[in-house]
Amino acid sequence: MKTKVFSLFMLCLGVQSLMFGQAKDMVLIEGSRYIPLYGRDSIVVEVKDFKMDIYPVSTENYKQFLKDNPKWRKSKIVSLFADKSYLSNWKTDLEPNDSIHPNSPVNYVSWFAAKAYCECQNKRLPTIDEWEYVAMADETTKDARVKPSYNAQILAWYEAPRTKENRIGETPKNAWGVYDLHGLVWEWTLDFNSVLITGESRKDVDKDSNLFCGSAAVNATDLMNYAAFMRYAIRGSLKAKYAMKNLGFRCVQDIKKENK
């Protein structure tokens, strides 16, 4: 009898540890109403409470996902779900190139693969509005968009080259406790291609995406708008099967799903 009780205790302890492991690197984001910049014509958006990963998904995280889910390995993935660049910086199905640090953000991952990874964690990709809502915070203020110095810093990050040597968590966390939303890699969102950049037609996206690194952002009248313009432009140029050097992801979780 004592043996059974001890075994049951250990099982419960193991389950609790597993649950903690899934949630320990997430932080609660308290939702609110806000006005996104660039491309939304001052429409107020409501963001509900949710949890967000503190860090983007690392190469080591993704390696474990591939071990558990063989169909997402580079030699097995269906071409419908990823282009030829998918995990092109990995030397084998389960080994990245030697130059890639395990704590670097995973990149060369398609939207389909990123979505599958999050779902395997009982999570999902953030929506654009959720991502933008959290990303407008600096180290002390949850809406730092009115600070010229902060917006200039973001633009400086965007202009700096991103390399495989950059690692997760080396820049200060923002007011929510989230790291690396700016300056490390671009990140997939659940609805990445749903925002109309100029507000008139989906065809405009291709036109505006060509301005991505240029100075001709028609609607970006200040630093604050221009930083947002760059994000909307890169999203508008993507397709779900694309895998790019400077594109990674992180996951979020609905509060209501967690409490079930």
Image (tube, helix red, strand yellow):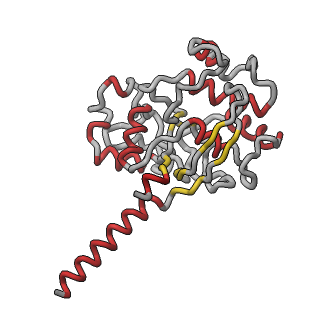
Above or below: residue 103 compared with residue 20: above
Q: Is residue 4 above or below residue 183?
A: below
**Quadrant including the C terminus:** bottom left
All told, the count of numbered labels is 0
| Residue 77 quadrant | top left
Residue positioned most to the bottom: 2
Q: Position of residue 151 (x, y in %)?
A: 77, 38
The residue at the point 77 percent across, 34 percent down is 224
**Position of 36 relative to 143 (above/below):** above
Q: Is residue 86 left or right of residue 226?
A: left
Residue at the farthest left position = 1
Residue lying at the far right in this picture: please name it: 148
The residue that appears at 49% across and 53% down in the rendered structure is 255
- For the point 82% across and 43% down, the residue is 147
How far from the left and from the top, in percent, is residue 100?
47, 43
Horizontal and vertical percent position of residue 173: 65, 54
Image quarter hosting the N terminus? bottom left
**Toward the viewer: 201 or 161?**
201
Asked whether 155 or 145 is in front, the reply is 145
Identify the image quadrant of residue 163: top right
Q: Residue at x 39, y 50 (%)?
A: 121
- Please state which of residues 80 and 52 is positioned toward the viewer in this rendering: 52
Residue 28 location (% of width, % of height): 57, 56
